[in-house]
Image: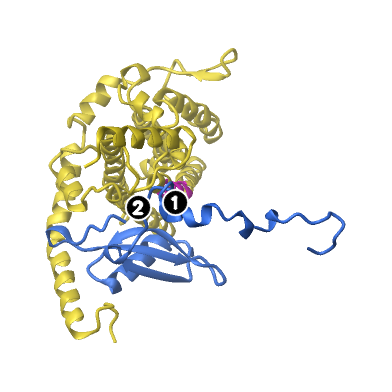
Amino acid sequence: MATEADERELRAHFEETVAADRRVEPRDWMPEAYRATLVRQIAQHAHSEIIGMQPEGDWITRAPSLRRKAILWAKVQDEAGHGLYLYGAAETLGADRDDLTRRLLEGRQKYSSIFNYPAATFADVGVIGWLVDGAAICNQVPLCRSSYGPYARAMVRVCKEESFHQRQGYELLWTMARGTAAQREMVQDAVDRWWWPSLMMFGPPDAASPNSRRSMAWRIKRHSNDELRQRFVDMTVPQADRLGVTLPDPELRWNEERGHHDFGTPDFAELARVIGGDGPCNAERVARRTAAHEDGAWVREAAVAHAQRRARRTDDSGVAR
Amino acid sequence: MNGTEGVDGGWPLFEVFVRGKRGLNHVHVGSLRAADARMALTHARDLYTRRNEGVSIWVVRSADVTASAPDERDPFFAPSGDKVYRHPTFYEIPDDVPHI
């Protein structure tokens, strides 16, 4: 048992590590609240990647060409990979994989509200890549310098791959925007539906985000929700202009004095409703994840049985002779 | 690496090491769960080398890793701390001596 003096010293060492911008590694001493905050954030992030496979996964069989199918397949596979990197990072904190899955299925851990909106047309696939993955990149690039080493390293991989996601989305829209009038209409319609939910991805406004300040002090987070939201708007406006679409916000305009765009306030009451479970697709997303988990149980059990039989037949390296 | 091993009859945890290209060391890239080492290898390929990141993969059960204590102030590393004479900069040599 650590005495009080020991704990004071350990805490001082932890604070010093974080303040000096060094990384905290798995077996280092860390305050319980730091560990709990990280597990919550990383698990929520991992769940988002896994649930995030669904809106676009629906379009794999309906993508209009083999090229688009192959791209979408690779992207959805990446999302699975991102989820796994992140579950791995959560496990370094002592979280248990099966327990994390259970918490997701029972609604005790959240995932990003954005994935509770439906992907209605193929243009939505493009807009998800451009706006949703674009917003995710804004959120995630600073996490590559997060104070917790395994999380930061996982985010480096994720960010490298997200760049492909965003570009394929923009290219898809670029192609449609140069197509028929009906295609251009589909693009604008998708932008109209996804713009505000994308802005909500940055979370509630700073004043209403009680955990943010502590996460920033611990350097888990590097920028506030509102800073990142502003950065995203500033990045996106010229991309929308080039694409020839209108972002559905009458208050959106360049503010010379601030050197940033002014923009309207997202409907944070809607955000709270969707997070609370009352979005267009919440029940459907969790039901589908639950079905996949239950339908896959025999595969997991068979793999264990197979591994045990192989272990009896071969040496203990697990590699067949 | 937390040594969690097959809780609830689930799959054990493996650590994954990838050699990026010939001439480089294998480097730890993360972990994954698999029923056995062979499955861990194929999962590691799908998870960590989707974009030609590797030419060779090692997997090892996390439970089989023996690690030093994490704290960098740990006396475990003390023996190298006071031996500055192991570094070339310890030795003062006139500036005009060539090739040394």
Left or right of A56? Residue B28 is right
Contact flag, marks 1 and 2 (Cβ < 8 Å):
yes
Seen as rendered, the residue at the extreme right is: B96
The kind of residue on which mark 2 rests is Tyr
| The residue stretch that appears in magenta | A153-162
**Chain of the residue that carries numbered disc 1 in the rendered image:** A
* Neighbours of disc 2 within 10 Å: few (<14), some (14-19), many (20+): many
Cα distance, mark 1 to mark 2? 8 Å
Mark 1 — residue?
A: A157
Mark 2 — residue?
A: A85
Q: Is residue A175 inside the magenta stretch?
A: no
| Nearer-N-terminus badge (1/2) | 2
Q: Nearer the viewer, residue B83 or A44?
A: B83
Seen as rendered, the residue at the extreme bottom is: A321
Quarter of the figure with residue B66:
bottom left
Overall secondary structure of the magenta stretch?
helix
Q: Chain A drawn in what color?
A: yellow
Q: Chain B drawn in what color?
A: blue
Q: Is residue B94 above or below residue A100?
A: below
The kind of residue on which mark 1 rests is Arg
* Mark 1, secondary structure of its residue: helix
* Neighbours of disc 1 within 10 Å: few (<14), some (14-19), many (20+): some
Quarter of the figure with residue A146:
top left
Left or right of A286? Residue A200 is right
